[in-house]
Amino acid sequence: MVKIIGAGFGRTGTASIKSALEHLGFGPCYHMFEVIAEPERMQDWSRALDGPVDWGQVLGGYESTVDWPGCTFWRELMAAYPDAKVLLTTRDPERWYDSTYNTIYRFVQDPPGEANDTFTTELRPTIERMIWNGTFDGRFEDRAHAIEVFERHNAEVRASVPADRLLEYQVGQGWEPLCDFLGVDVPAEDFPHINDTASIRDLAEQVQNEGKFPSPFAAS
Protein backbone atom coordinates (compact mmCIF):
# COMPACT_ATOMS: atom_id res chain seq x y z
CA MET A 1 0.00 0.00 0.00
CA VAL A 2 1.44 3.37 -1.05
CA LYS A 3 1.82 5.68 1.96
CA ILE A 4 3.86 8.48 0.39
CA ILE A 5 3.33 9.99 -3.05
CA GLY A 6 6.27 11.91 -4.47
CA ALA A 7 4.92 14.78 -6.56
CA GLY A 8 8.24 16.50 -7.29
CA PHE A 9 9.92 16.27 -10.67
CA GLY A 10 13.12 14.31 -11.14
CA ARG A 11 16.40 16.05 -10.29
CA THR A 12 14.96 17.50 -7.08
CA GLY A 13 16.93 15.18 -4.82
CA THR A 14 14.71 12.20 -5.48
CA ALA A 15 17.48 9.57 -5.37
CA SER A 16 18.49 10.80 -1.92
CA ILE A 17 14.83 10.87 -0.87
CA LYS A 18 14.33 7.31 -2.13
CA SER A 19 17.20 6.14 0.06
CA ALA A 20 15.96 8.18 3.01
CA LEU A 21 12.38 6.88 2.78
CA GLU A 22 13.53 3.29 2.54
CA HIS A 23 15.80 3.79 5.55
CA LEU A 24 12.85 5.19 7.49
CA GLY A 25 10.76 2.13 6.73
CA PHE A 26 8.69 3.44 3.82
CA GLY A 27 10.19 1.16 1.23
CA PRO A 28 10.55 -0.07 -1.25
CA CYS A 29 10.25 3.30 -2.96
CA TYR A 30 9.39 3.45 -6.66
CA HIS A 31 11.78 5.70 -8.62
CA MET A 32 12.79 5.96 -12.27
CA PHE A 33 15.64 3.63 -11.35
CA GLU A 34 13.05 0.86 -10.97
CA VAL A 35 12.36 0.97 -14.70
CA ILE A 36 16.03 1.39 -15.56
CA ALA A 37 16.65 -1.85 -13.68
CA GLU A 38 13.59 -3.51 -15.24
CA PRO A 39 12.63 -1.66 -18.45
CA GLU A 40 9.59 -3.90 -19.00
CA ARG A 41 7.97 -2.06 -16.07
CA MET A 42 7.53 0.92 -18.38
CA GLN A 43 4.68 -0.95 -20.06
CA ASP A 44 2.59 -0.17 -16.96
CA TRP A 45 3.22 3.53 -17.37
CA SER A 46 2.57 3.46 -21.10
CA ARG A 47 -0.86 2.02 -20.33
CA ALA A 48 -1.41 4.69 -17.67
CA LEU A 49 -0.88 7.38 -20.30
CA ASP A 50 -3.74 5.87 -22.28
CA GLY A 51 -6.27 5.66 -19.46
CA PRO A 52 -7.09 4.28 -16.00
CA VAL A 53 -4.95 1.46 -14.65
CA ASP A 54 -4.96 -0.74 -11.58
CA TRP A 55 -2.49 1.13 -9.39
CA GLY A 56 -2.39 -1.77 -6.97
CA GLN A 57 -0.94 -3.84 -9.79
CA VAL A 58 1.47 -1.15 -11.02
CA LEU A 59 2.77 -0.31 -7.55
CA GLY A 60 2.12 -3.54 -5.73
CA GLY A 61 4.64 -4.04 -2.93
CA TYR A 62 5.78 -0.40 -2.91
CA GLU A 63 5.12 1.93 0.03
CA SER A 64 6.29 5.16 -1.58
CA THR A 65 7.01 6.83 -4.92
CA VAL A 66 9.33 9.63 -5.96
CA ASP A 67 10.58 11.01 -9.28
CA TRP A 68 9.18 10.14 -12.67
CA PRO A 69 7.18 8.25 -13.75
CA GLY A 70 5.10 8.46 -10.56
CA CYS A 71 5.09 12.26 -10.28
CA THR A 72 3.29 12.52 -13.64
CA PHE A 73 0.32 10.77 -12.02
CA TRP A 74 0.30 12.43 -8.62
CA ARG A 75 -3.39 13.36 -8.91
CA GLU A 76 -4.42 9.83 -9.86
CA LEU A 77 -2.31 8.38 -7.07
CA MET A 78 -3.88 10.73 -4.53
CA ALA A 79 -7.30 9.47 -5.57
CA ALA A 80 -6.17 5.84 -5.46
CA TYR A 81 -4.49 6.21 -2.07
CA PRO A 82 -6.56 8.78 -0.14
CA ASP A 83 -4.64 8.21 3.10
CA ALA A 84 -1.22 8.69 1.53
CA LYS A 85 0.82 11.80 2.25
CA VAL A 86 2.27 13.89 -0.56
CA LEU A 87 5.91 14.90 -0.74
CA LEU A 88 6.79 17.77 -3.06
CA THR A 89 10.55 17.88 -3.54
CA THR A 90 11.78 21.19 -4.95
CA ARG A 91 14.97 23.09 -5.72
CA ASP A 92 16.10 26.34 -7.34
CA PRO A 93 14.48 26.33 -10.82
CA GLU A 94 17.59 27.45 -12.70
CA ARG A 95 19.75 24.79 -11.07
CA TRP A 96 17.01 22.22 -11.60
CA TYR A 97 16.98 22.92 -15.33
CA ASP A 98 20.75 22.69 -15.70
CA SER A 99 20.82 19.44 -13.75
CA THR A 100 17.93 17.89 -15.69
CA TYR A 101 19.31 18.90 -19.07
CA ASN A 102 22.76 17.53 -18.30
CA THR A 103 21.54 14.26 -16.80
CA ILE A 104 18.09 12.84 -17.52
CA TYR A 105 17.62 14.56 -20.87
CA ARG A 106 20.99 13.51 -22.19
CA PHE A 107 20.66 10.08 -20.60
CA VAL A 108 17.56 9.32 -22.66
CA GLN A 109 19.23 10.49 -25.85
CA ASP A 110 22.39 8.46 -25.10
CA PRO A 111 21.62 5.62 -22.63
CA PRO A 112 24.49 4.04 -20.67
CA GLY A 113 26.27 0.84 -21.52
CA GLU A 114 24.89 -1.63 -24.01
CA ALA A 115 21.22 -0.71 -24.03
CA ASN A 116 19.15 -3.85 -24.50
CA ASP A 117 16.20 -4.14 -26.85
CA THR A 118 13.65 -3.66 -24.06
CA PHE A 119 15.36 -0.46 -22.94
CA THR A 120 15.26 0.85 -26.49
CA THR A 121 11.75 -0.26 -27.38
CA GLU A 122 9.95 0.24 -24.06
CA LEU A 123 11.70 2.73 -21.81
CA ARG A 124 12.93 5.44 -24.15
CA PRO A 125 9.73 5.88 -26.23
CA THR A 126 7.52 6.10 -23.13
CA ILE A 127 9.85 8.58 -21.41
CA GLU A 128 9.77 10.71 -24.55
CA ARG A 129 5.98 10.52 -24.68
CA MET A 130 5.45 11.09 -20.96
CA ILE A 131 8.08 13.67 -20.09
CA TRP A 132 9.72 15.47 -22.98
CA ASN A 133 6.76 15.48 -25.38
CA GLY A 134 4.09 15.31 -22.67
CA THR A 135 4.96 17.36 -19.62
CA PHE A 136 7.23 19.73 -21.56
CA ASP A 137 5.27 19.83 -24.84
CA GLY A 138 8.31 18.85 -26.90
CA ARG A 139 10.02 22.07 -25.82
CA PHE A 140 12.36 21.04 -23.04
CA GLU A 141 15.33 22.65 -24.77
CA ASP A 142 13.49 25.98 -24.42
CA ARG A 143 14.87 26.83 -21.00
CA ALA A 144 12.26 29.47 -20.12
CA HIS A 145 9.40 27.17 -21.10
CA ALA A 146 10.78 24.21 -19.14
CA ILE A 147 11.26 26.31 -16.01
CA GLU A 148 7.73 27.71 -16.36
CA VAL A 149 6.36 24.14 -16.54
CA PHE A 150 8.41 23.20 -13.47
CA GLU A 151 7.12 26.15 -11.45
CA ARG A 152 3.52 25.70 -12.62
CA HIS A 153 3.60 22.03 -11.62
CA ASN A 154 4.82 22.88 -8.13
CA ALA A 155 2.18 25.60 -7.78
CA GLU A 156 -0.56 23.17 -8.80
CA VAL A 157 0.56 20.66 -6.18
CA ARG A 158 0.62 23.33 -3.48
CA ALA A 159 -2.85 24.55 -4.45
CA SER A 160 -4.41 21.10 -4.74
CA VAL A 161 -3.09 19.10 -1.78
CA PRO A 162 -4.51 19.81 1.69
CA ALA A 163 -1.87 21.40 3.92
CA ASP A 164 -1.99 18.58 6.46
CA ARG A 165 -1.27 16.07 3.73
CA LEU A 166 1.61 17.92 2.03
CA LEU A 167 5.29 18.49 2.77
CA GLU A 168 7.31 20.73 0.47
CA TYR A 169 10.89 19.70 0.97
CA GLN A 170 14.47 20.30 -0.18
CA VAL A 171 17.12 17.71 0.57
CA GLY A 172 19.36 20.25 2.27
CA GLN A 173 16.82 20.42 5.10
CA GLY A 174 17.96 17.03 6.40
CA TRP A 175 16.02 14.48 8.41
CA GLU A 176 14.01 16.65 10.81
CA PRO A 177 11.16 18.04 8.68
CA LEU A 178 10.78 14.76 6.82
CA CYS A 179 10.65 12.68 10.00
CA ASP A 180 8.28 15.12 11.67
CA PHE A 181 5.96 14.93 8.67
CA LEU A 182 6.03 11.14 8.68
CA GLY A 183 5.80 10.76 12.45
CA VAL A 184 9.03 8.79 12.86
CA ASP A 185 12.24 9.22 14.86
CA VAL A 186 15.26 10.96 13.38
CA PRO A 187 17.97 8.40 12.50
CA ALA A 188 21.47 8.63 13.87
CA GLU A 189 22.93 8.28 10.37
CA ASP A 190 23.67 11.25 8.14
CA PHE A 191 21.05 12.11 5.55
CA PRO A 192 21.98 10.52 2.20
CA HIS A 193 23.26 12.76 -0.58
CA ILE A 194 23.66 10.81 -3.78
CA ASN A 195 23.23 11.02 -7.53
CA ASP A 196 24.81 14.38 -8.34
CA THR A 197 25.21 15.50 -11.94
CA ALA A 198 28.66 13.95 -12.27
CA SER A 199 27.64 10.50 -11.01
CA ILE A 200 24.23 9.82 -12.57
CA ARG A 201 25.57 7.93 -15.59
CA ASP A 202 27.73 5.70 -13.40
CA LEU A 203 24.81 5.11 -11.04
CA ALA A 204 22.44 4.35 -13.90
CA GLU A 205 24.92 1.85 -15.34
CA GLN A 206 25.24 0.20 -11.92
CA VAL A 207 21.46 -0.05 -11.57
CA GLN A 208 21.13 -1.43 -15.07
CA ASN A 209 23.86 -4.00 -14.54
CA GLU A 210 22.90 -5.10 -11.03
CA GLY A 211 19.15 -4.83 -11.41
CA LYS A 212 18.66 -2.77 -8.26
CA PHE A 213 19.34 0.61 -6.67
CA PRO A 214 22.32 0.54 -4.25
CA SER A 215 21.48 1.65 -0.72
CA PRO A 216 24.02 3.90 1.05
CA PHE A 217 22.94 2.35 4.36
CA ALA A 218 24.77 -0.90 4.94
CA ALA A 219 22.13 -2.16 7.36
CA SER A 220 19.15 -1.22 5.18
Image (cartoon, rainbow, N blue to C red):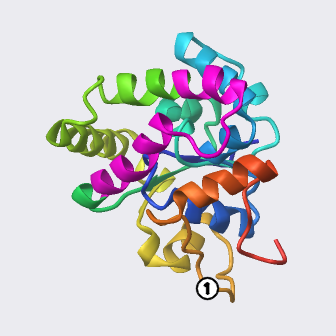
Residue sitting farthest toward the left: 144
Residue 174 makes an appearance in the image = yes
Q: Which of the 4 image quarters holds residue 27?
A: bottom right
Q: Give how far across and how far down residue 177 sits, in percent.
A: 49, 73
Give the prevailing secondary structure in the magenta stretch: helix
Q: Give how far across and how far down residue 208 sits, in percent.
A: 72, 47
Residue sitting at x 69%, y 89%: 188
Decide: is 12 above or below 30.
below
Number of dots carrying numbers:
1
Q: Which residues are magenta?
A: 96-125
Q: State the SS at label 1.
A: loop
Label 1: few (<14), some (14–19) or many (≥20) C-alpha neighbours in 10 Å: few
Tell me if residue 25 is in the magenta stretch: no
Residue sitting farthest toward the bottom: 188
Residue at the spot of label 1 = 190
Residue sitting at x 41%, y 41%: 105
Please give left or right for residue 93 compared with residue 187 in the image.
left
Name which residue type carries label 1.
Answer: Asp
Residue sitting farthest toward the front: 114
Q: Nearer the viewer, residue 218 or 156?
A: 218
Q: Nearer the viewer, residue 188 or 134?
A: 134
Residue sitting at x 67%, y 39%: 114
**What is the quadrant of the C terminus in the image?**
bottom right
Residue 31 makes an appearance in the image = no
Q: Give how far across and how far down residue 71 sits, in percent.
A: 50, 39
**What is the quadrant of the N terminus in the image?**
top right
